[in-house]
Amino acid sequence: MNMQHIRVVTAVALAMCWSGDAMPTSAPVRTLPLQDDIWITGTIQRGSDQYAPGDYTTILLDRPAASPCSDKVVTDMLLGIGGTPGPTLLLPYLDQRVAVKGRVNCPRSGIQFSPQPDVVFPVW
């Protein structure tokens, strides 16, 4: 290759990097494992009638993840045990960012996270 070709190839490579077309800059969205104990981090919120009737708690995830139930990207999940929403589950941590251990399950209503309430840690 002559020097002019090297300069053109270098210029094209640099332009692709600056334009964002070369590679995505964000990490790929990972699929949550189904029925395995996992740790997730997020903010505990109070929901009302969006994912289930009545009052309940949800977790707003720190990072979006793919649902094993529908392959859609989720940003928050209903908290419950055994497919039933838990209205006061993790309520003491309302509006706090936490790390919590639990399992993802797929009730008829969609994705749900069943946390272990005794394994919750506030994250600052």
Image (cartoon, helix red, strand yellow):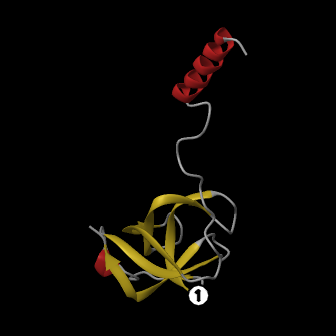
Q: Among all residues in the image, which is located at the extreme left?
A: 124
Of residues 70 and 46, which is closer to you in this image?
Answer: 70
Question: In x, y percent, where is residue 73?
Answer: 60, 56
**Residue 25 located left or right of residue 2:** left
Report crowding for label 1: few under 14, some 14 to 19, many 20 or more residues within 10 A (C-alpha).
few
What amino acid type is highlighted by mark number 1?
Gly
- Residue 67 in the image: above or below residue 7: below
Q: Quadrant of the C terminus?
A: bottom left
- Residue 101 in the image: above or below residue 67: below
- Residue 61 in the image: above or below residue 83: above
Question: In x, y percent, where is residue 86?
Answer: 46, 83
Q: In which quarter of the image is the N terminus?
A: top right
Question: In x, y percent, where is residue 5?
Answer: 68, 13
Of residues 104 and 82, which is closer to you in this image?
Answer: 104
Q: Among all residues in the image, which is located at the extreme top?
A: 4
Task: Give the residue number, with chain letter if any, for mark 1.
Answer: 82
Question: In x, y percent, where is residue 30?
Answer: 60, 61
Q: Which residue is drawn at 40% across and 87% down?
A: 117
Q: Which residue is drawn at 30% across and 69% down?
A: 96
Quarter location, residue 35 = bottom right
**Residue 111 located left or right of residue 46:** right
Q: Which residue is drawn at 51% across and 82% down?
A: 102
Q: Which residue is drawn at 57% across and 60% down?
A: 65
Quarter location, residue 13 = top right
Q: Among all residues in the image, which is located at the extreme front?
A: 2
- Residue 117 in the image: above or below residue 98: below
**Residue 51 located left or right of residue 67:** left
Of residues 19 and 57, which is closer to you in this image?
Answer: 19
Say what secondary structure mark 1 lies in.
loop
Q: Among all residues in the image, which is located at the extreme right?
A: 1
